[in-house]
Image: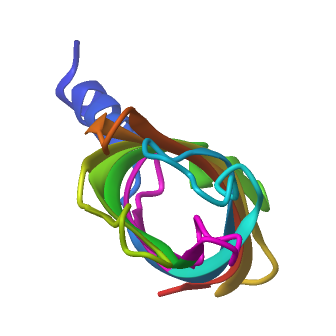
Amino acid sequence: MSRSRLIAIALGLVACGAATAHAQIVVTPLVSATVRTTPGFIDLDDAAKDAHGGFGVAASWLSRGWLGVEGEMTLTPSAFSGHDLVTSSRLFTASGGVMLMTPARWGWIVRPYVSLGAGVAQVESVDVARLFVVDSTPPIATASAGAWAWLGPRIGIRTGIRLVRSLGTIETDSFQTWQPSVGLSWRF
């Protein structure tokens, strides 16, 4: 094989190689809810199974390929309150995870993802007589699925649903909840 032919092949391989990966940081303030919750303790108002609104923020690092990393924090005030016997309650979750998503090079406006992660939850519930006070901080595992729909180069909408489950018991059982969410995303 001639030297010029080897150089041409080498240049062709370099030209066909992977493009430089430009990662993106995406910040998403979001509104969320807790639904189908199993509290893991005596639910005096029987309110955990009902939907309760919350809010939070997610920060994601997205590669142009298949992988990304995310961190998410959500706060759900009155997550276990029916305001009969439980005077105050809240659920705070903070987690990080690894994302698997469609590559950006596919050119889709919608970019679906799934993620697995771990973190911690702060579970609080106080009843009127202060007999069944719950204040627990269990480790959690999370699994989520969702998508970004990009409206322009910097702005998009993120929707998703996340399963949060404690890795131990709160009092009598494990805590588990589903958290659907939607938010406005900014790409940097």
Q: Does 50 appear above or below 57?
A: above
**Residue lying at 34% horizontally and 34% vertically, measured from the top left:** 13
Left or right: 61 as drawn, with respect to 10 = right
Instruction: Tell whether 119 sits left or right of 172.
Output: left
Q: How many marks?
A: 0
Quadrant into which the N terminus falls: top left
Quadrant of residue 8 within the rendered picture: top left
Residue sitting at x 73%, y 78%: 156
Residue 53 drawn in magenta: no
Q: Is residue 66 visible?
A: no
Q: Say above or below: 33 vs 177.
A: below
* Front in this rendered view, residue 175 or 160: 175
Q: Which residues are magenta?
A: 57-86
Residue farthest to the left, as pictured: 3
Q: Locate residue 77: give its quadrant.
A: bottom right
* Membership of 70 in magenta stretch: yes
Task: Measuring from the top left, give residue 161's x and y in whole percent.
Answer: 67, 51
Give the percent coordinates (x, y) of residue 185. 63, 81
Q: Position of residue 136 (x, y in %)?
A: 26, 60
* Viewer-side residue, 8 vs 49: 49
- Dominant secondary-structure state across the stretch colored magenta: strand
What is the x, y in percent for residue 145?
Answer: 63, 44
The residue that appears at 66% across and 60% down in the rendered structure is: 45
Please, which residue is most extreme toward the top here?
A: 1
Q: Quadrant of residue 76?
A: bottom right
